[in-house]
Amino acid sequence: MAEIINGKELAQKIRLGLKGEVTELKNNGIIPKLAVIMVGDDKASKVYVRNKSKACEEIGVEFEEFLLDDTTTMEQLLNLIDELNNRNDIHGILLQSPIPKHLDINLAFNKIDYRKDVDGFHPINVGKLSIGEDCFISCTPFGVVKMLEEYNIDIQGKNVVIIGRSNIVGKPLIQCMLKKNGTVTVCHSKTQNIKEITKNADILIAALGKAKFVTADMVKDGAVIIDVGINRNDDGKLVGDVDFENVEKKASYITPVPGGVGPMTIAMLMTNVVKAAKNLEK
């Protein structure tokens, strides 16, 4: 039976540490502040933004919200980002996705000053990550790395299989795992014989957004399972990309959904905001 990696508990521990760092910054006259832009009326986004605002409040980071309606033009969005880039009181800028289809999210991400890009999506941060330079790392992959570190799960020389190649999770995870000397394989919708590949994984990370996609027969005994997926089943219950009940019996470590990677993502966002404020201090 696998040991459960408790993301909720770990995230709490990280936030507690950050609280002390924020107090120290404030003593030096720096008040860390996060600006969140939300375009449109996406219900899930509203929940995420509320959670981010709560986390800010908990650790003492100021939070300013910019709610734009569906009719916002690209020009208006870019102008707002420009304005926030130029505000010295704002250390981190986050554009909540998804945004309405008529807007170009990549153009918007590129407009955010990379020094305030606490989501780690700016090409400069993505590039720095790939060549091993200090940068802002996308919050979910960053959270996965922290979990493995905290549970003393060694990545060096291990077969790491990532299912999913999104810009937000899959691709940055490749770089994070390579940096830790893992041997990385990426599977995606065009991969053939996926089970043969996943069965060789010492560490299997599922980030494809399909409920219970990873079944017990795809997992080798004693593998470490990280489930990044958040899906709702027919009963409206939150489930991951992994068939938790059955895979848990074979794995050595496994993350639950909810209570696994999710809370870590927000904790790492807070880590990035504090880092951005500290960079200003230098």
Image (cartoon, helix red, strand yellow):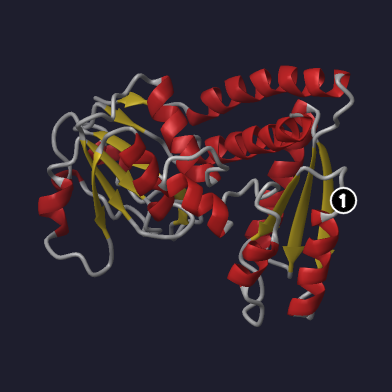
Left or right, 201 with reference to 176 = left
Residue nearest the viewer, comparing 194 with 242? 194
Above or below residue 110? Residue 268 is above
52 left or right of 199 in image: right
For residue 111, above or below residue 214: below
Q: Residue at x 23, y 70 (%)?
A: 190
Q: Quadrant of residue 224?
A: top left
Residue 115 x, y percent position in the rendering: 68, 47
Residue 129 in the figure: left or right of residue 225: right
Residue 99 is left or right of residue 131, and the answer is right
Q: Which residue is mark 1?
A: 87
Disc 1 element: loop
Residue 24 vs 236, above or below: the answer is above
Vertical comparison of 197 with 204: above or below: below
Q: Residues within 10 Å of mark 1 (few under 14, many from 20)?
A: few
Residue situated in front as seen by the camera: 12 or 108: 108
Could you tell me residue 212's position as x and y percent?
A: 32, 52
Residue at 47% x, 56% y: name it. Answer: 232
Residue drawn at (81%, 28%) of the image = 60
Q: Position of residue 156 (x, y in %)?
A: 25, 29
Q: Does the image show residue 97?
A: yes
Q: Amino acid at mark 1?
A: Arg
Numbered-mark total: 1
Q: Quadrant of the N terminus?
A: top left
- Is any atom of residue 260 visible in this view? no
Percent position of residue 260, x then y: 46, 35
Q: Determine the residue positioned at 14% across, 51% down.
A: 197
* Quarter of the image with the C terminus in it: top right
